[in-house]
Amino acid sequence: MGNLSPTTLSDGCHRLATVGNNALMGIFVVTALLKSSCISVYTAVLRYSCLESAPPAHHCQQHLSSSFFNRMGFLGLVVLLFWVAIPLALGKLVMASPVKPITAGLVVVDTFKPLTLEQTIKLVMENNPKVKALQAQNQVSKAQLVTANARLNPTLVSDNGVAERSYRLGLQQTFELGGKRKNRIAVATAQQAVTDSTIAQQLLDIRAEVRKTYTQVFNLQERQAVTEEILATAQHLLDVTTKREKAGDVATLDVLQSEIVMVNARNELQLVAYQVVEARNRLNTLLNQPLGTSLQLAGPTTSETILTASQKSSTMTSPVSPSASTEISVEEFVVTAINNRPEVQQNLQTLTVIEKQLALAKANRMPNLNLAGGFDKTTGEGGLNGVFVMGNLELPLFNRQQGPIKEALAKKAQLEAEQQALKNQVSLEVTNAHAAVQAHQQRVANYETQLLPKAHQLVEKARRSFEEGKVSVLTPINAQQAFINNHLGYLQAMQDLQNAISDLERAIGIAL
């Protein structure tokens, strides 16, 4: 049999309590119905007996309210007590066992499994309130399209003349000419594409924030673990130095130096512990879960497949193994950025909006046609009943949409000039981000393969040499400081690498 977790036991108790509660309730209902039927039959028989034997009225009444009713009432009371007592006992068992917390509107992450960077980004994109607000913004844009698609409402008109004794009642409708509605829909559709690009840009910013915060939390947790290890080593050095000082092998100065190292390690541990809490709270906020939730992070990848893609595929949405990959050139990244960068697409789509607005402004030069018609009645002598028809059309003599047309042409020229400048800026950002990723990947590799192993060996050899009395306490202290510097440099290199990856993703407009 498998192990029963508290949650499984709690769920089982809940189900047992529900089944017992429902079963006892059914027994109670059936018993109540039987009691009611028996009382009805027994009452009829007893009344018939009373009428046949004609006893005193109070005797029949007393007999009706006696034995059988008391027995049935007692039975119902017993069933009712079982119906209430057993679920209460089961309820106490359920309350005694831990249950899952219910957190309205929040996401509780399983803290027993290390959370990868990809899983964290996915959870944020699914549950972050800011992401949901962006999705709602897209719905607002769609509603504006519905508004642009609407037709003009008719107008009820009434024209009454007392002197003429004429009365008119009818409807007036404005007909949009020149394709105004069609162009208005085209403007709203193009504007929706601009909104989509804006949302994509903000989602990339959120993704970059998640990557940077995740890496910062992981690095700080690693730094905290290293600091705790350093504190234990400092305490060991202090103990050894104190014993050797009492034996007269070392001077009191060595003890003081060991104490300073230990106090500095304690101060560093307190600072790092605060920084871990602060960074973890920011990551929990992005995940939309309680701030105090502890997180186990698997750590960001340092694989060199970030800048590689399959030789059989030109997509860069997911890395592949180095054995079946080839490095992507900067030029390929630039082309990808031009095709996917939200700002570039937003500029192109805004240019489309301006072109549609220009077409709408030209369509607005055509005046709308207003037609009215209805019932016409004249009273008095020779009164007549008939219909009336009226129409009017604005003459575009002075306002022929010169201002909107000129404004649209000017914005179009501006956007065309900005498009080239934007492409140059994207090319610069992609090139710099690509170079940064390459440099920081090499830094991380140097730390992992050379600096950290050698620094660890240095600490171990210095500690053994000091314990054997071959060197002074300054040797293990200096070795430990070198190890600290190398480990902090490694964590900073990892942070710089993830920041560079975020910048590259932001530069090309898609996830790596």
Image (cartoon, helix red, strand yellow):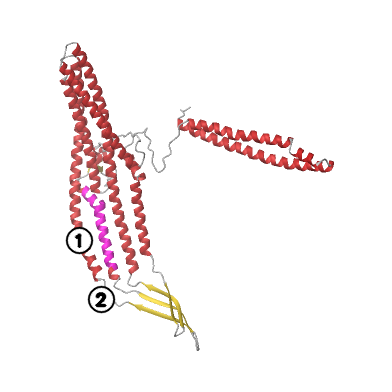
**Could you tell me which residue is drawn at 31 percent across and 63 percent down?**
187
| Label 1 environment density (alpha carbons within 10 Å; few <14, some 14–19, many ≥20) | few
What secondary structure prevails in the magenta region? Answer: helix
Residue 83 % position (x, y) = 60, 35
Viewer-side residue, 158 vs 225:
158
Q: What residue type is labelled 1?
A: Gln
Residue 176 within the magenta-colored segment of the rendering? no
Q: Is 344 inside the magenta-drawn segment?
A: yes
* Of the pair 296 and 403, the residue shown nearer to us: 403
- Extreme residue in the right direction: 53
Q: In this rendering, does residue 454 appear at all?
A: no
Residue 369's spot in the image, x, y percent? 36, 75
Q: In which quarter of the image is residue 207?
A: top left
**Residue on which the image places disc 2:** 398
Name the mark on residue 414: 1
- Looking at this view, is 469 or 254 the one in front? 254
Amino acid type assigned to the residue bearing label 2 in the image: Phe
The range drawn in magenta is 333-360
